[in-house]
Image (cartoon, rainbow, N blue to C red):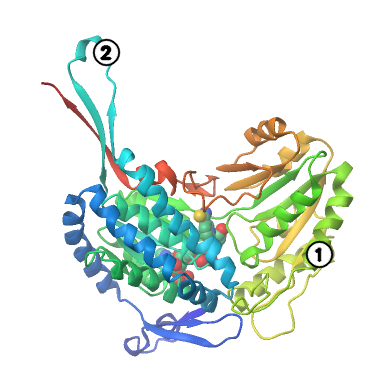
Amino acid sequence: MSETEEDTERGDGGDTREAETVVSVNPATGDVNEEVVATTPEEVDEAVEAAREAQRSWEARSVNDRLRVLDVFQNHLIRRRDEVARTIAAETGKPVGEGLVTDLIPVIDAVRFLKKRGPEVMETGLDLDNIMVMDRKSKIVREPLGVLGMVTPWNYPFGIPGSQVVYALFAGNAVVLKPARETTLTGLKIEEILNDAGLPDDLLHVVPGGGSTVGQAIVESDIDQMTFTGSNAVGEMIQERCQERGVPTTMELGGSDPAVVLEDANIDKATSGIVWSRFMNCGQTCAAVKRAYAHDSVFDEFRDEIVRKVDKLRVGNGAEENVDVGPLIDEGAVDELAQQVDDSVEMGAEVLTGGERLDREGSFYAPTVLGNVTHEMPVVREETFGPVIPVMGFEDISEGIEKANDTRFGLTASVWTRDTDRGERVAREIDAGTVVVNDHGYTYGINETPWGGYKDSGHGRTHGVWGIEEVTRMKHINKGS
Ligand code: TAP
């Protein structure tokens, strides 16, 4: 949770000069973590200019030279993992262990992947079998785009910006990044640790502040590419503006990911995976299982097992021991979720467990399972960002696939069956950027694999070979003797 006092003051018509701060607040306790001075739009422009200057010499360095800095960064991250995970916990309320697994490991793993596969992607020789040119040699080299603008959300405040920054820097780019206000301190940690690792000055600028001021200033600045991760409402606005300005974009937007459980699935495994996916990060994951469908023949067993496992989840402040589910990011998020559940219940949904805010300090909502749900209800029709899972049945697999695809989103999906060939056939029918058979859809930490969505979940990919391609241009060099 946070406030940009600048925005508040402007709304009141007050003096903006002394109010340019971002306040980082712990959503589990309401305590202020720290207040940080916000960047001005003019400073954003200066940051982009300085980054452009620094980028030229960074690009001129060899790939291995750039990797050496990232290698030191990786070591610092491993050494400072607890400090980073505690900063994340203080700003989001998520369990410290979860921050380690879902925020830090993806970034540590990104460096591992780039060390292993990055150099060959940046320069690859081609075999020329064409009889006309057998005495010539071709190669593909990838060149950086320049200065990249990034705007990121609070839900994975280290994992998302950290991975994106690492790929961009590896490829020879500079970055100007605005982290979400709620998680400004975590965003600044990325900059601090990279600088400690020897990143040259001005290559990475983390610019704290609000979306409508600092975020907007990045979009309007002299950047060469814009990577946005967040809601569809903001993403679509940024996309339109970048298109007008001719700035290429990568968009990582919302999700309403389905889990499809076939009649032969291992129900214990499926329900464990689905509960983990939906309730980690207090349900505030783009790629969480947000809708669960089980074949009618196993539906009752599936539903009861989901409820049993959800009832065992321990809710609390993630900075403390023995907590599975932390708070939501702020009271506004609790209000929005409560409204989606209440409206769905009014339309006939049945609360199988939970279904209410928790009467305790902090922004907490009870882990909730809803039955008797239809696709007209807000908990299915809209993206829900909190600890709520609707469970539904299907008569045959074509109905299961139809229901899974009945959404504007297409980020990830999962299929659960003992017959993995059949699982793959179903996976091919589902409209999503990633479909996982017999595991939850969350593959963000596996850097060999691409990350990105179909339909309104965005475009472009941020991981793997494709993540490098996204932040580079391809040049073909052909040499004769
Ligand atoms: P948003 O409200 O869209 O905020 C994301 C970022 O955009 C924040 O830094 C925000 O700044 C900034 N922003 C807001 N208005 C802006 C503007 N006019 N111009 C430029 N930047 C602006 O999203 P959220 O609520 O933080 O995150 C939740 C959403 O993100 C969900 O829909 C979730 O599914 C999606 N998400 C997607 C992915 C992937 S990889 N597909 C990953 C995580 C989350 P403030 O600091 O002012 O809020």
SS at mark 2? loop
Q: Residue at x 42, y 57 (%)?
A: 163
Under 8 Å from ligand 1: the CB of mark 2?
no
Tell me if residue 418 comes above or below residue 91 in the rendering.
Answer: above
Under 8 Å from ligand 1: the CB of mark 1?
no
Q: CA distance from mark 1 to mark 2?
A: 67 Å
Q: Amino acid at mark 2?
A: Asn
Q: Residue at x 64, y 75 (%)?
A: 327
In the displayed orientation, state which residue is furthest to the left: 481
Q: Amino acid at mark 1?
A: Val
Tell me if residue 473 comes above or below residue 388 in the rendering.
Answer: above
Residue position for label 1:
345
Q: What is the x, y in percent for residue 103?
A: 50, 63
| Residue 225 appears in the picture as rendered | no
Between circles 1 and 2, the one closer to the viewer is 2
In the displayed orientation, state which residue is furthest to the top: 131
Q: What is the x, y in percent for residue 407?
A: 65, 47
Q: What is the x, y in percent for residue 345?
A: 81, 64
Tell me if residue 360 comes above or below residue 475 in the rendering.
Answer: below
Say left or right for 399 vs 240.
Answer: right
Tell me if residue 267 comes above or below residue 427 in the rendering.
Answer: below
Query: Could you say which quadrant of the image residue 206 lies in?
Result: bottom left
Q: Residue at x 83, y 56 (%)?
A: 305
Any mark on residue 130, and which? 2
